[in-house]
Amino acid sequence: MRRLPLAMMVFASVCALSAQTEPLEVNPSFQPAQARSVIDIPYTPCSVCGTVVLDALITETGDVKAVQVRRDMACLTQTAVQAIKQWKFTPATIAGKPIASRMPVAVTFESQLSAPNPSPLPKLVPQTPAAIQAEFQPAEVTRAASPPFHAGYAVVQGTAALEVTLSAKGEVENVNVVRNIPPFTQTAEAVLKDWRFMPATYNGHPIESKILLAFVSPPYVYVPPRN
């Protein structure tokens, strides 16, 4: 009879250990926001070029409520912020219910000279306590790349935008063109292999997510290839 309490204690200890080692709950029904309407980001003549990284705070209706700066370039950031505030999204959902969320947006401003690679990437701006404590943490850009500069006779200017699906390992899984500026878009897609990302997390666990990459081209002329 004395063995029974001991057996119960062992069983309780195993249950407690099992509970401690079980992974935190990950909500598999979470679906990130998706870009629906992206307007042009004006080209800003500046003494520098590089990649500005922002978080768009998206409401349950898909509007951009605010834009938080994650990587800042003084003479370029506000141009990107003002344009992104006018973008429209399909809101994120959990179990099919629309929720407010954050969408990372990396905006690369091209140079009128040869494009530097990797693209200059400013240091991260510290997040607010509320952002740090959020269940969902967006993907982070750790390396950016610029499309090559072209020269020729057909004038090309504008913003090409790509919606990139990232795996739970931070690798590119799919690319959706949301704003097309041929042939600039194709050169932007070609340099994606040189970008690097940290994956998004939900409750501390890496998950599949989306990030928007916008490439702002200065006025230049393009020579189409000869057949």
Image: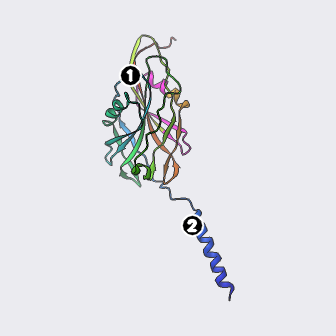
Comparing marks 1 and 2, which lies closer to the viewer? Answer: 1
Horizontal side, residue 57 vs residue 3: left or right: left
Q: Quadrant of residue 22?
A: bottom right
Image color mode:
rainbow
Which residue is at a point 48% across and 18% down the rendered structure image?
149
Look at the picture and state if 48 lies above or below 77: above
From the viewer's side, name the closer residue of 28 and 51.
51
Q: Which of pointers 1 and 2 lies earlier in the amino acid sequence?
A: 2
Check the image and report above or below for 52 versus 55: above
| Amino acid type assigned to the residue bearing label 2 in the image | Ala
Residue 36 % position (x, y): 36, 38
SS class, disc 1: loop
Q: Which residues are magenta?
A: 165-188
Q: Which residue is mark 2?
A: 19
For label 1, the residue is 46
Residue drawn at the location 54% of the way across and 41% of the way down: 170
